[in-house]
Image (cartoon, rainbow, N blue to C red):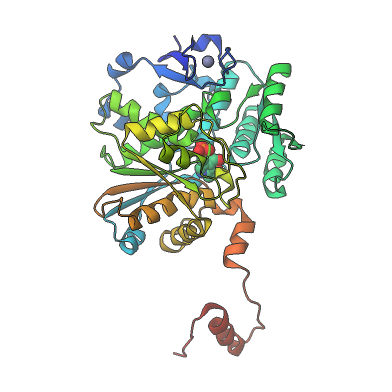
């Protein structure tokens, strides 16, 4: 037995594995996710509120008992997690809500929540004896992976789509990842195909941020839920808003609340609200149409400013749908224009600068308020998952550039009026 992990079980064929078998993908080749099960009875012996409260929240590794790896000395960390839960005073007032909280995941080491999962993933790779990892992404997950691999002295091979922007590739290259662009051929995602082939041929550790190719990273996202509960003084909010691409984050957040419920640390679970962009809403469509969770129809031509949510196929959608069902949750799509509105509100009312994917959750809340789904007195937590500086192009598109003047007061008053609509009066 590995610490408290009893077994891993494939979400599709139910085949089980022990941690000692070092499982990565289901050997039946069905692309099921290997869900990790813990010995809750053994944990219940000591894992209570007093035990948790007695440790300071310095990073997500406060919750080591509920995470792989087995040995503490294999942990690869940059002090991810322990992010603030900000009481959104001005935004609450603006929206007419009583209790709005923002979980500010932009504060993580590489500026997105993906650090949590990649810290766990690289730690497990180290424990399993790997020193080469492979991923299929140019986004936040790959950036996080490259940083943690650098910290551990491991190599990263990153396959990215041909159209991947230089801004994202630059971060990967700088951390030392070997980045390769892959042409889009055929139906299968060409980067996922190369990741799979590389794993099969060269034996590299697959470390994307979705379940079927990496069961361990999902565990990192659970710690968001543990932290929220503790930061609310063991209160359970009515709603938690989650941005969704592959639905791995949603799955991890759900598992976190399930853990605490099963351990008797909380008596109820929050309702989860999944948000996608209208430019790519396959998960929301599956929820609304009641599609078969194991056969979610992919979105044909994803296109949204929220590039972190652009997965045409929600790899962990089966668990994501189960999460919504078991928490009486909900899912909705929002237009990119509302995501931009949410970005502005976060920045201008709360001083939090989020990227589009990170603000989509708030956009979902704006729509849910309009639709009358949220009660104004509900306690609501919004996950703000990634930093605005990740994407300077979007920023420029939204707010444009600053005007230029000579050092002259007359020009200042003119430009203030013209550019910002502000009339400056002499004192
Ligand atoms: C900032 C940000 N938020 C949310 C998500 C969505 O997570 P998931 O793909 O697990 O649904 C991503 C995924 O890349 C992301 O980068
Ligand atoms: Zn299987």
On screen, residue 53 above or below 404: above
Q: Quadrant of residue 223?
A: top left
Residue at (66, 77) in percent of width and height: 404
Residue at (55, 54) in percent of width and height: 388
In the displayed structure, does residue 386 sit left or right of residue 372? Answer: right
Figure disc tally: 0
In the displayed structure, does residue 197 sit left or right of residue 236? Answer: right
Residue at (33, 31) in percent of width and height: 326
In the displayed structure, does residue 225 sit left or right of residue 335? Answer: left
x, y percentage for residue 336?
53, 56
Image quadrant containing the C terminus = bottom left
On screen, residue 94 above or below 357: below
x, y percentage for residue 67?
44, 23
Is residue 154 in view from this perspective? no
Residue at (25, 31) in percent of width and height: 266
Q: Nearer the viewer, residue 18 or 147?
A: 18
On screen, residue 92 above or below 280: below
Q: Nearer the viewer, residue 146 or 10?
A: 10
x, y percentage for residue 275?
45, 45
Image quadrant containing the N terminus = top left
Is residue 350 in view from this perspective? yes
x, y percentage for residue 240?
36, 43
């Amino acid at each position: 037995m590995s610490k408290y992990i009893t077994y891993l079980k494939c979400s599709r064929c139910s085949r089980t594995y022990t941690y000692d078998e070092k499982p990565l993908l289901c050997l039946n080749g069905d692309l099921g996710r290997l869900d990790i099960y813990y010995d809750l009875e053994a944990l219940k012996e000591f894992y209570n509120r007093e035990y948790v409260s007695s440790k300071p929240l310095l990073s997500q590794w406060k919750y080591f008992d509920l995470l792989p790896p087995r040995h503490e000395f294999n942990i690869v960390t940059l002090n991810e997690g322990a992010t603030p839960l900000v009481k959104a005073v001005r935004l609450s007032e603006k929206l007419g809500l009583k209790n709005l909280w923002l979980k500010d995941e932009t504060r993580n080491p590489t500026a997105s929540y993906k650090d949590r999962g990649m810290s766990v993933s690289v730690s497990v790779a180290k424990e399993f004896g790997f020193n080469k990892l492979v991923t299929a992404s140019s986004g936040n997950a790959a950036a996080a992976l490259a940083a943690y691999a650098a910290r551990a002295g491991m190599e990263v091979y990153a396959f990215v789509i041909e159209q991947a922007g230089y801004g994202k590739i630059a971060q990967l290259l700088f951390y030392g990842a070997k980045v390769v662009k892959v042409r889009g051929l055929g139906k299968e995602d060409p980067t996922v195909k190369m990741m799979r082939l590389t794993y099969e041929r060269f034996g590299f550790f697959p470390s994307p941020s979705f379940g079927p190719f990496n069961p361990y990273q999902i565990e990192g996202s659970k710690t968001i839920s543990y932290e929220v509960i503790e930061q609310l003084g063991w209160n359970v909010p009515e709603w938690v808003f989650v941005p969704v691409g592959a639905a791995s984050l949603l799955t991890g957040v759900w598992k976190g609340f399930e853990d605490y419920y099963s351990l008797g640390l909380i008596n109820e679970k929050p309702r989860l609200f999944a948000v996608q962009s209208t430019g790519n809403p396959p998960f929301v469509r599956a929820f609304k149409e009641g599609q078969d969770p194991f056969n979610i129809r992919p979105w044909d031509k994803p296109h949204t400013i929220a590039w972190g949510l652009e997965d045409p196929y929600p790899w962990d959608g089966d668990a994501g749908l189960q999460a919504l069902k078991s928490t009486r949750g909900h899912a909705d799509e929002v237009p990119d224009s509302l995501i931009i509105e949410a970005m502005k509100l976060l920045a201008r009312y709360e001083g939090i600068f989020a990227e589009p994917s990170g603000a989509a959750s708030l956009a979902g809340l704006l729509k849910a308020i309009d639709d009358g789904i949220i009660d104004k007195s509900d306690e609501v937590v919004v996950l703000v998952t990634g930093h605005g500086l990740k994407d300077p192009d979007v920023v420029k598109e939204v707010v444009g550039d600053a005007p230029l003047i000579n050092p002259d007061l007359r020009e200042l008053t003119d430009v203030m009026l013209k550019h910002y609509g502000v009339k400056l009066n002499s004192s």
